[in-house]
Image (cartoon, rainbow, N blue to C red):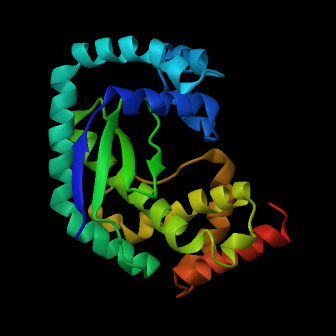
Amino acid sequence: MPEITSTYDVKVDWRNRWQAANQFTNWNWVMFMPKEDQEMVAKLKGLTWEEAEKIMTPYLEKKYQDNKETMDDAVIKMNEYLNEQKEELFKAMEKLTRHSIEYKMFTIYLTTLNRCPYNWHDGTIWMVDSKSPEYRSKMWRWIFAHELLHMQTHKYYENAEPMSKLSPMQFNDLKESLTFLLNHEFEWIDMREDKWYPQHQELRRVLEEYRVNSDKNFDDLIAFGCDYMLKNDL
């Protein structure tokens, strides 16, 4: 069974901010960011990693110093919560996708930006803390399951037909829309409801209607979703 470890790292955190400003991303999270973070991310647009580091390192080192007790507690609790339920999470995801979780390690990085990306190649996930301590466990389980579903989709489906027929943007839209499944398959974990991005709501509705009203499996759902997107030129 894969191990789960959690930590924080200034350099990893500022790269999240740099990527937010300079690489493809869903921008809906911006509205939830404090003004200070919005302004800082805007400063990074067009900068190289080296240029961004000169701005971000002192900024984040101070933020880490000012919030060290809270961040240390978050890392400890995050590790505890996720490891307590990892067996159930992994089993549920394997049942849903019908593919094994082939990672030896998941590394969780606490990030100070309200954006939680992932690297499906090495099992890295960025997680934000919650301002509400009692809400932490629910949010972290949701983020982990959400990103794990993305990882499985990348690993087993992205480069195989019919998903390989999609454009990168179509793949992203379908991948994000598939997370409606968490509201059904992972309801027993008492996670936060997965609503996600406004631009995906109609596709999520179509996929959910197809899946919930039938006994179709994950492969069937992906095939249906690909066919629907290609036929409708989405």
Q: Residue at x 43, y 29 (%)?
A: 113
- From this view, report whether residue 85 is shown above or below residue 20: below
Q: Nearer the viewer, residue 11 or 221?
A: 11
Q: Compared to 13, does 189 lie above or below?
A: below
User: For the C terminus, which image quadrant?
Assistant: bottom right
Quadrant in which the N terminus is drawn: bottom left
Question: How far across and how far down the image is residue 192, in percent?
Answer: 37, 51
The answer to whether residue 117 is above or below residue 114 is: below
Q: Is residue 12 left or right of residue 62?
A: right
**Identity of the residue drawn at 19% across and 21% down:** 68
Frontmost residue, 203 versus 165: 165
Classify 202 as above or below 131. below
Toward which corner of the image does residue 28 lie, by quadrant? top right
Q: Position of residue 100 (x, y in %)?
A: 37, 77
State the residue in front, 71 or 210: 71
User: Quarter-wise, where is residue 154 in the image?
Assistant: bottom right
| Residue 119 position in % (x across, y down) | 46, 51
Image point 55% across, 21% down: which residue?
41
**As drawn, is 50 to the left or to the right of 113?**
right
Return the residue nearer the eye: 95 or 65: 65
